[in-house]
Amino acid sequence: MQARNPIALAVALLCACLTAQAQSYPTKELNVVVGLPAGSGGDVIARYYANKLAEVSGKPVIVENKPGMILSLGADYVAKAQPDGYTILVTSITSSHAANLFNFKKLPYDPVKDFTPVTTLQKGYFILMVRPQAPWRSVAELTEAMHDKGDKASYGYGSPPALASAELYKARAGLKALGVAYKTSMNSLAEMYSGALDFQFIDSTQGTVQMRSGKLRAMAITAGERVPGVDLPTMAEAANIPEFDISPAWGVFLPAGVPQPIVTQLEYWFNQIVKMEATRDYLAKTHATAFPGDAKTLAAFLPKEIERWRELSRLAKIVPQ
């Protein structure tokens, strides 16, 4: 009797084990990873979905912050995790999986091959903001003032969309403002309040808070069209840059190789969350919009987003670091 191939036997045992795990999933707490510091705008987004995931799954959900490389350290952590469905990445698809391909010379992961798509969640935008004491009341006035300041003008950024927004504005308006990098937009607020930074594009989650409190003045949004309930022009209108449309999308990924039943279960849970009335209220408060989908939606969206950011990075003259 011929001996069985030991490699084939090992593969068969592994598949049987994964199938059994998928059928009983989940049996323990789930871990949601976000590649940003606690308290940042992106962390607020991830924690909202993590809290709701605990509700619909009936299991505890632990949020792990893995900040660094503008969301890429968190993505890398998940890419290298066990493909058992217990390590879940809630991330800005736009940053960790698209824009960072052009912000860094080499990422420690492949944004397509090293992940299993689960679903899309929401889209947002950034707000061009200045300190309330600034004399500029429109983007046109800001542009004129930044021309006058030349290379003494400055702006802050804490994410790839914020950097691309500022650099696209600079390139099309012919500005020489110096960019100052921060871990998140929140880390730049002291310099914004003091006037050390002239302007900044801040994500709508944090920017809305700053606008409502009167701590910063909003001038325009980066979305390609006006957002209902937001009395602000688009950058395409205000700066006369027709191609200006930066609307970061958020989604859910798992490591590559997760069994399909687990993907389907998480896809179902996250879609339940997106449809909740509580989610509609949460999105309205942060002026974000729902981006419902599934694994196929995210898989189709990602390569298109990568190509879009290839072009945006070219237009904004982003130099990989």
Image (cartoon, rainbow, N blue to C red):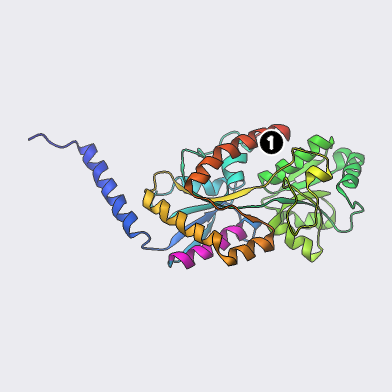
Closer to us: 105 or 222: 222
Q: Is residue 262 left or right of residue 45?
A: left
How far from the left and from the top, in percent, is residue 182? Answer: 70, 49
Q: Is residue 81 above or below residue 107?
A: below
Q: Nearer the viewer, residue 145 or 194?
A: 145
Task: Confirm whether residue 53 shows in the render.
Answer: yes
Q: Is residue 85 visible?
A: no
Q: Is residue 186 left or right of residue 303?
A: right
Residue 154 placement, left or right of 101? right
**Residue 121, position as x, y percentages in the image:** 56, 54
Asked whether 172 or 121 is in front, the reply is 121
Quadrant of res 281: bottom right
Q: Quadrant of residue 2?
A: top left
Numbered label tally: 1
Q: Residue at x 72, y 50 (%)?
A: 126
Q: Left or right: where does residue 63 sit relative to residue 319?
A: left
Crowding around mark 1 (Cα neighbors within 10 Å: few <14, some 14 to 19, many 20+) is many
Identify the secondary structure beneath mark 1: helix
User: If the image is split into quadrants, where does the C terminus sit?
Assistant: top right
Q: Which residue is at a point 50% across and 39% down the rendered structure image?
A: 112
Residue 106 in picture, x, y percent from top left: 57, 34
Q: Is residue 260 magenta?
A: no
Q: Which residue is mark 1?
A: 312
Residue 305 placement (x, y as % from top left) = 60, 39
Q: Which residues are magenta?
A: 43-57
Q: Is residue 83 above or below residue 272?
A: above
Q: Amino acid at mark 1?
A: Leu
